[in-house]
Amino acid sequence: MEASTTRIASGFVAAFALLALNAAVSYTTLGNLVAANHLVASSEQSLRLLGELRSSLVDAETGQRGFVITGDERYLDPYLNARPVATAKIKELTRLTTDDTERNARLTALEPLIAKRFDQLNEVIAVRRERGMTAASAIVQEGPGKVLMDRIRHIVSEIQSREEVVLATRSAEAEFNAYITTVTFAVATFLNVCLLGGICFLVMRGTLVRRKNTAAERDFNAKLAASLAEVRERNQEVTHMSQMSGFLQTCASSEEACTAIARFGPQLFPHEAGTIFMFHASRNYLELAASWGGADTAEDMFQPSECWALRRGRLHTVAEHDHSIVCAHVARHGKMTEPYLCAPMMAQGETLGMLYLQAKPSAEGVAAPFSESKQQLATAVAEQIALALSNLKLRETLRQQSVRDPLTGLFNRRFLEEVLDRELARLERKNLPLSLIMIDVDNFKSFNDTFGHEAGDAVLRDLGGVLQRHVRGSDIACRYGGEEFTIVLPEANVEIGRQRAEMLREAARELRLVHDGKSLGAVTLSLGVACFPEHGRRREHLLQVADAALYEAKNGGRNRVVVSNVKTLPVAESQPQRDQRGH
């Protein structure tokens, strides 16, 4: 009997040692997974900054080119805004790439090139002011600006390619860490079950040979059973945690993530009812996002000040019948009878929401307070959910920023160039026309000079709404740059394009703008119309012809539609020219 007791005790010690090892391995693998996810988010941010840097350079060249052609100071607004933006993006990129010597060296080489390019643009602008369009055009045609810009594009493309490779590597590392975590937990669970099964076998065999159980033996068996149950519960929690993390990494939206959380919530917290609250976009209140376990969802929204966990930035637990401070969003339901906890969901310094858990009464009608291990699990789950939602939010922002103009909500120039090439190829195969309308706001500079830049932004926002309301589902409305807009009308001939342009001109003229209680007066548009295939078969040709028609409309008195009478283009542009706006 003494030898049997020794074997059981040894097995018990081994079980606890294995449990400690399992916890250490779990902590390490989860830490590696979280670190990999942080690196993925950093690479995605670097790619976004590179895209914004490229856009600022294109805006600067567009503003300079418009000024050289027209001599109108209004076209210099994009150029004046682009230089501080480019400088800020370079600094932010340098900060994000301090751990990569190669990328940091490329950025160090890129910064003086960008400064030199802005100096060249400034020189052309100065010559245009002092000596006229012919002298400025002669400097542009000499080509140093194009050579320097090609070099800048080459370096930016190298950095972007490098960052995409780093992003792919880091994503693969994150997936590998998730796989290693799952495998580790599965192996540890198997080993724990085998070891504890052997211990149970020894205990059962010793019980059969003993004539009666002593009080000490019964206590030991109870502790062993409790330990076995705890080990199984911890292993299940870790396994479910890893599975939930894997699902959250593959979700494409916050709605999918909330669905996955509601799916794994009952597995992670089988004895608790849970609710996920997310901050509204206004950050003024939280609203219900997911729930499980029969949670009381009568309180589907509340203010952040009504929760002690959000106010303190850490876990807040209330046990039954104690004297703890009860959150206002719980106390409003009446007398609090069940223990609960609130865990803030924080990631990258931002609070995204809150995890609320309420203990369920047992078969005896009593709800147990939250144990230390349960509180630790709730904290870990809240952190994992917050990190996944933060990554989703960043990816959604990047997707929107890559194709949408933030001020007007219309598609941006990059999206226009991609979709216009695709539509031209499709319509050429089907032998169908396509109309393109270039739009410019008349006297836009006077809005800014008279009412301020905020009023100018209000004009562009309202005009963007007008364009969205007056285009078909198959049409494409884009902000081309500054106060210029572009409408693509697939399968519309030149007459339909002219009619649609007249309709937009009338709709804009009837628009009455008010900003800060002040009337901004009426707004008028000048529009140029070009059609495929009459005026060109390539994107750059159509844009060039429509732009020329637009300038003809502005020079003819503004507030009018001009259909281009150009039939062919005199020259074919090269690939670098097609990457820029043709004038």
Image (cartoon, helix red, strand yellow):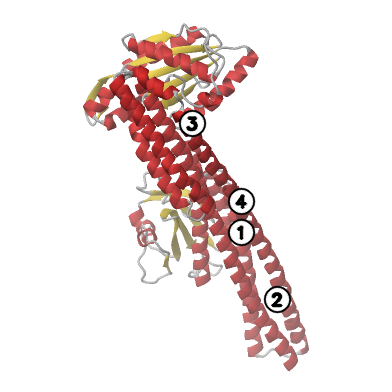
Which mark lies nearer to you, 3 or 1?
3
Around disc 2, counting alpha carbons within 10 Å, would you say few (fewer than 14), some (14 to 19), or many (20 or more)?
many
Is label 1 in a helix, a strand or a loop?
Answer: helix
Q: Relative to 514, does residue 243 appear above or below in the rendering?
A: below
Give the labeled residue for mark 1.
242
Is label 2 in a helix, a strand or a loop?
Answer: helix
Which mark lies nearer to you, 3 or 4?
3
Give the labeled residue for mark 4.
169
Q: Position of residue 16 (x, y in %)?
A: 63, 78
Is label 3 in a helix, a strand or a loop?
Answer: helix
Which mark lies nearer to you, 4 or 2?
4
Give the labeled residue for mark 2.
196
Tag 2: residue type? Leu
Q: Earlier in the sequence, mark 4 or mark 2?
A: 4
Contact between labelled residues 1 and 3, with CB atoms less than 8 Å apart: no
Residue at image coords 53%, 70%: 373
Tag 4: residue type? Thr
Kindly report the distance in space between the C-alpha atoms of the residues bearing marks 1 and 4. 21 Å
Q: Relative to 524, does residue 211 appear above or below in the rendering?
A: below
Q: Earlier in the sequence, mark 3 or mark 4?
A: 3
Residue at image coords 35%, 40%: 84
